[in-house]
Image: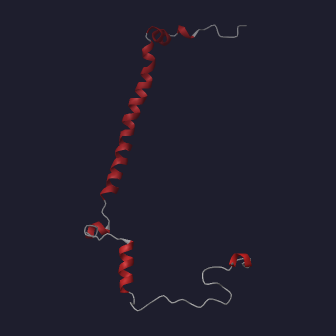
Amino acid sequence: MPTFSSNPLNSKPVHRVLRKHPSLFGIPFVIIIVGASFAMQSFTQTRYDLHDKKVTQVNKEQELGLTKNRKKFDIREEYFRLSATADEEWEPKRIERPKGLPEWGVPPAEPPSKQDKA
């Protein structure tokens, strides 16, 4: 009993035509690609229509015209404006330091030696 069937594939008329004209083998692929392009056209058009609708919607600020003459905000300018309106008589006042704490910072860990003072 043979392993393979005795009926070869080349006996069918389709295979004979493909053997004579191998370029016909790609025709189903091209038909699928072109058909899918036409089938996807409505979905693609819907996508672009929805995007266009979102872009053309106007929010409340644009509707009222608030964005046209809006003043630019600068944090430094706002700081100086607020500091100028503050009470002019205010001055920073130093508080008394606790006993044993030097005026500028934390006391050193070791007491200064006599050689450093000389």
Residue 73 spot, x, y in % from top left? 34, 71
Q: Nearer the viewer, residue 36 or 77?
A: 77
- Examine the image and state in which quarter residue 113 appears: bottom right
Vertical relation: 46 (above or below) 28: below
Residue occupying image coordinates x 34% and y 56%? 54
Vertical relation: 58 (above or below) 39: below
* Placement of the N terminus among the 4 image quadrants: top right
Residue occupying image coordinates x 66% and y 79%? 106
Residue 41 spot, x, y in % from top left? 36, 39
* Placement of the C terminus among the 4 image quadrants: bottom right
Q: How is the image coloured?
A: secondary structure
Residue 74 spot, x, y in % from top left? 36, 71
Q: Nearer the viewer, residue 112 or 66?
A: 112
In this view of the protein, can residue 52 be seen by the observer?
Answer: yes
For residue 40, side relative to residue 98 (left or right): left
- Examine the image and state in which quarter residue 91 appears: bottom left
Residue 101 spot, x, y in % from top left? 66, 85
For residue 88, side relative to residue 105 (left or right): left
Q: Nearer the viewer, residue 27 or 113?
A: 113
In this view of the protein, can residue 113 be seen by the observer?
Answer: no
| Outermost residue, front side | 118
Residue occupying image coordinates x 54% and y 89%? 94
Q: Nearer the viewer, residue 88 or 39?
A: 88
Q: How many marks?
A: 0
